[in-house]
Amino acid sequence: MFLNSYETIYILKPDVKDEVNLNLVNYYKTLIKQNGGQNIFVQHRGRRHLSYNITHYYDGIYVQVNYCGNGKLVKLIEKSMRLNNYIMRYLTVRQDILNNMNIC
């Protein structure tokens, strides 16, 4: 099976505790592993000021997840993020193979 390299960035509400943040990271890591994802790399980008307010929040906690997977996995992750009350926004992009340092 051919796996593409993806990068998902999601923004948490600023009032989310560190414990909940770590639980979400672990949840998405296990979700990716259970559905055939590989090479999972998580970076906490920290609290940043938003360009415009989202549901009356001016700050957000950014988390970046890089992984290898297929389109079904991306749909599953995005559906889970859409239904999560702690996540304000998310974005998934497929990384170009030429610019990707860790090939799947």
Image: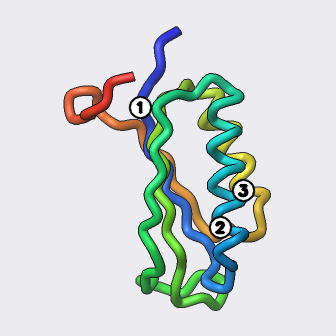
- Spatial CA span between label 2 and label 3: 16 Å
Which numbered circle lies on residue 21? 2
Q: Amino acid at mark 1?
A: Ser
- From the viewer's perspective, is 7 left or right of 86? left
The residue shown at (50%, 47%) is 92
Q: Which of label 2 and label 1 is nearer to you? A: 2
The residue shown at (32%, 24%) is 103
Which residue lies under the disc numbered 3? 82
Seen in the picture, residue 93 relative to 37 is either above or below; the reply is: below
Which residue lies under the disc numbered 1? 5
> Would you identify the image quadrant in which residue 76 lies?
top right
Q: Amino acid at mark 3?
A: Arg
Find out whether the residues at labels 2 and 1 contact each other: C-beta distance under 8 Å: no
- Spatial CA span between label 1 and label 3: 21 Å
- Spatial CA span between label 2 and label 1: 24 Å
The residue shown at (41%, 31%) is 5
The residue shown at (42%, 68%) is 45
Secondary structure at badge 3 equals helix
Residue 40: image x %, image y %? Answer: 50, 38
